[in-house]
Image (cartoon, coloured by chain):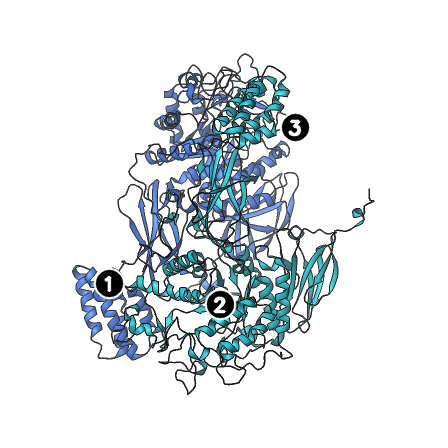
Chain colours: A blue, B cyan
Amino acid sequence: MATRTPSRPGGKTADAIPDEDGRQRAVIDAVMPVVDAGRFAVKAIAGEPVRVQANCFTDGHDVLRVVLRWRAEAAIGHQEVEMALAYNDEWFASFTPEAPGRYHYTVTAWVDHFESWRHELSRRVDDEDIRIAALVGAELVEDAAKRAKGDDKIALKNWAKQLRKNGGDAQALKALALDPLQAELARRHPDRQGATHFPIELPLVADRPRARYSSWYELFPRSTSPEPGQHGTFKDVEARLPYVAEMGFDVLYFPPIHPIGREKRKGRNNALTTEAGDVGSPWAIGASEGGHKSILPELGSPEDFRSLVGKAKALGLDIAMDIAFQCAPDHPYVQAHPEWFRWRPDGTVQYAENPPKKYQDIYPFNFETDDWRALWQELKSVFDHWIGEGVTIFRVDNPHTKAFPFWEWAITAIKREHPEVLFLAEAFTRPKVMHRLAKLGYSQSYTYFTWRNTKQELTDYFTELSQGPGKDYFRPNVWPNTPDILNEHLHAGGRPIFALRLVLAATLSSSYGIYGPAYELLDNVPRSPGSEEYLNSEKYQLRHWGDWDVARPDSLAQLIAKVNGIRRDNPALQSNESLRFFHTDNDQLIAYAKQTADGDNLILTIANLDPHNPQSGWITLEGDVLNLDHSSQYEVHDLLNEQRFTWQGLRNFVILDPRQAPAHVFRLRKRVQDERHFDNFA
Amino acid sequence: MATRTPSRPGGKTADAIPDEDGRQRAVIDAVMPVVDAGRFAVKAIAGEPVRVQANCFTDGHDVLRVVLRWRAEAAIGHQEVEMALAYNDEWFASFTPEAPGRYHYTVTAWVDHFESWRHELSRRVDDEDIRIAALVGAELVEDAAKRAKGDDKIALKNWAKQLRKNGGDAQALKALALDPLQAELARRHPDRQGATHFPIELPLVADRPRARYSSWYELFPRSTSPEPGQHGTFKDVEARLPYVAEMGFDVLYFPPIHPIGREKRKGRNNALTTEAGDVGSPWAIGASEGGHKSILPELGSPEDFRSLVGKAKALGLDIAMDIAFQCAPDHPYVQAHPEWFRWRPDGTVQYAENPPKKYQDIYPFNFETDDWRALWQELKSVFDHWIGEGVTIFRVDNPHTKAFPFWEWAITAIKREHPEVLFLAEAFTRPKVMHRLAKLGYSQSYTYFTWRNTKQELTDYFTELSQGPGKDYFRPNVWPNTPDILNEHLHAGGRPIFALRLVLAATLSSSYGIYGPAYELLDNVPRSPGSEEYLNSEKYQLRHWGDWDVARPDSLAQLIAKVNGIRRDNPALQSNESLRFFHTDNDQLIAYAKQTADGDNLILTIANLDPHNPQSGWITLEGDVLNLDHSSQYEVHDLLNEQRFTWQGLRNFVILDPRQAPAHVFRLRKRVQDERHFDNFA
């Protein structure tokens, strides 16, 4: 919030000298990572080091000392870490936020006269200069002694005394003055009076690791009954949990589970009128049975829900809940809080519309209501309610159609109390809006992946996501399909295109998800040619997916399990910042790698973007990215099919047949063994 | 200064709702140009429009209005300009700071219910919807009428009344509701109650045009005597003014003109001892005759200096003065203000040193003195003194060895009183330090041009200077040579390399300078092989350059005059932001263009970087940069030698012989005439 205060230089006379001490000679020009000059929090993961860079220097040749100062938000004092100069006035240090929560960090730097003296002395050659320098040093050490206590004080006083006895050999005096142990002692008691403090404490939010690395599976609980035509229940979902867990997912996400409005209910395939038995859209929330804190009776009871959450957790699955802040006309809020809605001159509530389109089954909240404080509190209490029921992940529906200040307040407040809670922004909208939501606090964000299909599109987009200005706050979560998006690309291409998009999502992004069983069972029928809507979409009706456990022969379930297993075993795939693309001489082949910071785990994916034909070509790796050169020999081990090849140098040939595999997912192992590693090599 | 206040979120309870109005739904995500979130001023030119971008949006589909608000620093209220949405939530507007000085700008945005209503209405088709919308509109218009006065109030009330008469034809009602003249009326009285104000007023410094476009000539006044061995005077310089002006320069810069210290004076070629008649370095400032506000008696009197300044101005030349804040041991400050210097334990003043190098003829100021306020005031008064003598440009020597807070205060204070004054930072140092000085207020900065020689080096560096993050505050001034830098590149290569570097400097950068007559007379003799120091440097002795007015046959004076004339006639060369480089298939050929915003003036430079051999190759222009395509025919007119060629398409062949010319400096004229321009073409 530091930059919120408007600045208007006051009535100072033209050359009034500033009140601050003009002798603060150290300059802190930038501290990174940073989002909008500290207006928003940087995102990090609890237990993982945050590398902070500060650009610091001073006039002339004096030596600086720079410290990183950080604290958990609630802590009283700062912890300090000495920063080290790397190159080009860039100083670095790391700190580790141990637990999820909010942190602050900043930097202090000062011209250190002791270090400057020592640095200059080390380069002095003239005897007389050394003798004078020893006296200067004695003064500095005496000053340090004044700041020290106990043994340090005594030792420093002694050292100063020796430095003042400068009758003898100048070179011996120089050695005494440069004594590293003594220097370490003095360094512990620096003179920080003229220190420069970076004027902003930068905020940071540390999340649990699932914010960085997660594999999502979305299903409609109402479609999980083993009986065709029967409304599924939470008990039915419990029976499906092993299936989901065995595919290797760790988040199971449900569309809204609340009572569904009856007024203006939509029929199958979004029809304006219903037929008997039509179940309506789960996003038309609220009816006489209750609203956002209630459960659709057909799904089960609150106890059933808690049981499901517990059983999922036991299998390593977080249940993610959909939060859609909108009301069906018969939502209890409409009666209880008419002031939270907009009213039209004809005495009706303003439904959602984007003329000429109308959504009469949905009433949006009016965030400009005079009663906005009560509205905010009530909406936040919806999250609080479900957190109480064991939910720790929320997928928020269309957050970009609700007032932005609400999200910043609500997410910050909820995470202060429950730092383990994560929020996924379902905002398929314009780039700056998506970025703003991430800045306001969303832990993960949906992306444009669905609409990025060519090599150039994928390369540009994922380079931007992993290296661009959003990398410190925008965590992508990529979905090959959703109940709303059956991309045209999937309409044709059959099983190979589904396999390809799955592998791309899972290897390009450390967080991804699919909407199933539509995905693994290859549902590719749009409502009309070119439409992104599913025919007979589960949004408006029950679907029966057959017996999932005995997989159909063409089901992708086994491939998905394989891919999620590779993700679990290879930490390179669990974050995005190392992603780099490589040149291929065939535009249907895309090649990219991810690796851990130590380079130990290195995954090279080469995918054939053509679902119809085998494609081949030459891949040119970048030696400086992968730490290889033209003479390197290394093994590439395809984790999808367990094939191993020995490659040499940076250019290698690849052929991929979509009927066999969408991609190579290679683990690259450098051959470090050669004759020089024999014990007797001399 | 907005971001200087440290932020430490206070003791609010976890979910306290913020005090601000949560109904401020408009988001202003970024305002540009901006330097370090408003901590430093953006630089602009008085009389030229500043294009401001704001990234603004709101939740949902409502329509925003966005205004740019700006003011001169001393002004009471803001002026407002309506911003227009271009694309991708980016809004633009311009304002023009008419006079040099300091300005502030910020942005206000609000969800405009009238505009939103009108936008939705335009897309409505249903009669009943239109009737209801008309009633909603009537309310909005009545509200606008309440904010209006006089005729507007009456007209708006009338319009609202008509909108309420909604018995008739819905389409006629829609037309009435969309009436553009009525809308314009309502637009004048918007409801800005829920407006969002960008929290920072961004500072901007507007300079006179010479800050953007300047051609500098440096000479040592003491070397201007027509008599060999004679100490030159300001009168001698007056006699040289036409020579400098005819070459087309507009800034004439002198090394320090103050009394030169006698204690520890350096001899010729930086010798530690002097011989009789040695004149010393002008940068060893101060002696019994005076210090930084005095003139070396050998050069003349204050009256002579004022006369010279006046005569130069009459020829279009600004005199730039060197400000070097350091003292010779016999500078009067040393006696009068011993507290402004560091003292060594042996009772001597600490001279400048970078061990093992010593500069015993130079005492630096101690910016950590307890008396720093008085030191700051005195140093500032040096500028004030020379401004009083008519100087408006200062070239500051080694600003990076003086405390940075001093510069920010001094430059800001001086420019508040004298906004026409310009400062050039002579800081040949590390990049972040150079950038900081520019942020602190320096109008122009020396660069690394001297050390950028290959095609790749020049392309990378000038792309960074013209497009990089410094473009809003760092104005490069590039020098092929200085009295301190005779780059190794110039040692061999003879006249062609001098001609080449001159043309590169003058066409790559809108501000450049040379140190003459050493440059145009091709002085290329270093003190030792590989050294960047001149042999018999004017820094330590008088030089006699012969009779400059009758140019030596190999002098570059005519070429320089030609090049500066081209710069004057072609506004494309007077700024840097349009600079773009093009592909050449020969690494000895570099090609780049600059153009005015309207594309009317377009200069394409193609230089041969090899001073020894003719080089030829194909140049590939970028059609989207130059607004050309493969079928374009256009004329390229070489302004250096008046040759004209007709080129077609984007690839063309070039051959350049360094014995004839270092480069083509083409003005590119598109052929717009063809048969379709005949009057009778139909």
Left or right side of A450 for A240: left
Q: Which residue is mark 2?
A: B320
| Type of amino acid under label 3 | Pro
Pointers 2 and 1 in contact (C-beta within 8 Å):
no
Q: As displayed, is residue A566 above or below residue A305?
A: below
Q: CA distance from mark 3 to mark 1?
A: 77 Å
Label 2 marks a residue whose chain is B
Foreground of the two, B680 or A276: B680
**Percent position of residue B284, x then y:** 39, 75
Helix, strand or loop at disc 1? Answer: helix
Circle count: 3
Label 3 marks a residue whose chain is A
**Percent position of residue A170, x then y:** 27, 78
| Type of amino acid under label 1 | Leu
Q: Which residue is mark 3?
A: A529
Q: As displayed, is residue B551 above or below residue A4?
A: below
Label 1 marks a residue whose chain is A
| Type of amino acid under label 2 | Ala
Left or right side of A491 for B516: left
Marker disc for residue A185: 1
**Percent position of residue A146, x then y:** 19, 62
Q: As displayed, is residue A342 above or below residue B296?
A: above
Q: CA distance from mark 2 to mark 3?
A: 73 Å
Foreground of the two, B523 or B393: B393
Q: Residue furthest top?
A: A276
Are labels 3 and 1 assigned to the same chain?
yes
Between circles 3 and 1, the one closer to the viewer is 1
Helix, strand or loop at disc 2? Answer: strand
